[in-house]
Image: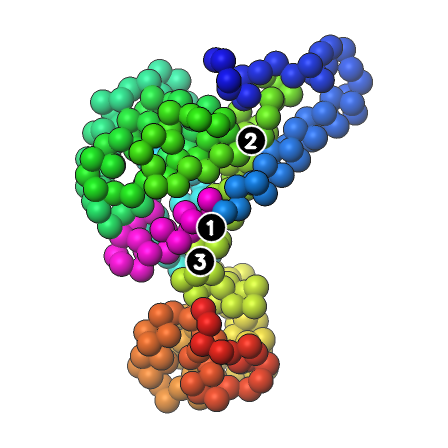
Amino acid sequence: MQGRQTETVSAAAQGIDTWPDQHILAALAEGQARGAAAVSSAFTDIARAADLLANALNTGGRLIYVGAGSSGLIAKLDALELPGTFGIRPDQAVALIAGGAASFERLDGSVEDDADLARADITAVNVGPRDLVIGISASGATIYTCAALKEAQARGAKTVGIACNSSAPIFEGVAVAITLLSGAEVLAGSTRMGAGTAQKAALNLLSTLTAIKLGHVHDGMMVNVRAENEKLRQRAAAIVARVAQIDLAAAQETLQRADFEPKIAILLAAGAKDTADAARLLQESHGHLRPALAWLGATPHAAATASGTK
């Protein structure tokens, strides 16, 4: 365990079991805040990983997360949220967790040491050169996760490692190493806490930056949201109304004509001849609204700062 901050007993937690509740909660909250703050020193590496991920998704590859225990659950959550939030195809956002679906009912710690299982899981999803495989491990030494990355590398995939300790085994051979120094846990070794918060924050940043690079975010709005229920249809209509500068009723009607695809609806409202024309504009702009709106001569608000940058 030498060198693993996540396993260090924090001197600040000495006697915590005798403290008043408010003091205990304050210490736990401070540990969470420290975990969230850990991402700031990793911005450069997170951005590099986002470039790799955007390229993988643009060229028909996939995001494949790999993790065990709490790290696997955090990765699965991020993968599940991407299709609805950003319209990324579900088959392009995959998460492998040690123990498979059974781990969503009960976490079995023994499978974290199964390298053969990791290699089999990577083989089962047919990882290849177009994919980006991201391994997440608080310690950075989880056998399942490290073995999965090695197998992915052998199959020609680019890999990224995320860990909360420096110089960790998970970083061997990866294209990008993301170190999140969340420090000693208030509850030593309980990496669902500070380290878990750091990992969740890092994945939030990584996947959202990737979505921006892919053109799925415009002026802080989710313009590729999948409008699958009434709440999301209302959100999508409000996005169309704001970007295209039309009233909500017109936005709702245009969104229906666009089969509830906000980008298509925005371009229809901005002057595209029909859905096929809007789709063509998006293809030519690589999915980014600003240049497409500029080509249509959209209103200054809708095409603000439209200079062809993406």
In this rendering, would 122 be left or right of 260? left
Q: CA distance from mark 1 to mark 3?
A: 12 Å
Pointer 2: what residue? 181
Give the quadrant of residue 111.
top left
Inspect the image, locate mark 1, and give the three-letter code of the amino acid beneath it. Ala
Pointer 1: what residue? 47
Picture residue at 31% right of the left edge, 79% below the top? 280
The dominant secondary structure in magenta is helix
Give the quadrant of residue 153.
top left
In this rendering, would 267 be left or right of 239? left
Is residue 270 shown above or below 64? below
Q: Within 10 angstroms of label 2, few (less than 14), some, or many (20 or more) residues?
A: many
Q: Is residue 52 magenta?
A: yes
Secondary element at image label 1:
helix
Q: Is residue 280 visible?
A: yes
Q: Within 10 angstroms of label 3, few (less than 14), some, or many (20 or more) residues?
A: many
Inspect the image, locate mark 3, and give the three-letter code of the amino acid beneath it. Ala
Inspect the image, locate mark 2, and give the three-letter code of the amino acid beneath it. Leu
- Marks 2 & 3, CB-CB < 8 Å contact: no
Task: Decide which of tag 2 and tag 1 comes sooner along the chain.
Answer: 1
Is residue 37 shown above or below 53? above
- Magenta stretch, residue numbers: 45-63
In this rendering, would 155 be left or right of 80? left
Q: Which mark is residue 211?
A: 3
